[in-house]
Image: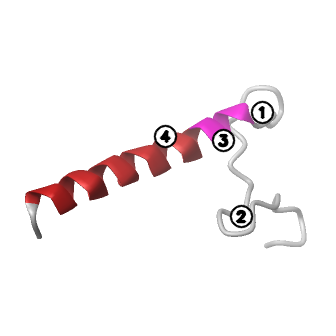
Amino acid sequence: MEPDQIKIAVERYDRCIRDTLNRLLEREPLRGSFLNTRVNPITGLDYDHRSG
């Protein structure tokens, strides 16, 4: 892999991680204090009691 490709990959990875964390932090906390990670990362839909 060329250095430019590595730089582009690192920047994209960093952006994806930051975007994901920001989306999680914007969600309403569970029980007022827990980070709400009950979301399907592919569909963006909330998991519920039927999701298992």
Residue 10, image x, y percentages: 28, 51
Q: Dividing the picture into quarters, in which one does residue 23 lie?
A: top right
In the rendered structure, which amino acid carries the disc numbered 3? Leu
Give the residue displayed 76% in from the left and 37% down from the top.
Answer: 27
Q: Secondary structure at mark 1?
A: loop
Residue marked by disc 4 = 18
Q: Estimate the spatial distance between the alpha carbons at disc 2 and disc 1, rounded to whole Å.
A: 16 Å
Nearest to viewer (mark 4 / mark 3): 4
The magenta span reads 22-26
Q: Secondary structure at mark 3?
A: helix
In the rendered structure, which amino acid carries the disc numbered 4? Arg
In the rendered structure, which amino acid carries the disc numbered 1? Pro
Q: Estimate the spatial distance between the alpha carbons at disc 4 and disc 3, rounded to whole Å.
A: 10 Å
Give the residue displayed 74% in from the left and 57% down from the top.
Answer: 39
Residue marked by disc 2 = 40
* Label 1 crowd bin: few (<14), some (14–19), many (20+), radius 10 Å: few
Give the residue displayed 65% in from the left and 62% down from the top.
Answer: 41
Number of dots carrying numbers: 4
Which labelled disc corresponds to residue 13?
none
Label whose residue precedes the other's in the sequence (4 or 3): 4
Residue marked by disc 3 = 24
Q: Estimate the spatial distance between the alpha carbons at disc 1 and disc 4, rounded to whole Å.
A: 18 Å
Residues at circles 3 and 1 in contact by the CB criterion of under 8 Å? no
Label whose residue precedes the other's in the sequence (2 or 4): 4
Q: Estimate the spatial distance between the alpha carbons at disc 3 and disc 1, rounded to whole Å.
A: 9 Å
Q: Observer-nearest residue: 49 or 42?
A: 42
Helix, strand or loop: magenta stretch: helix
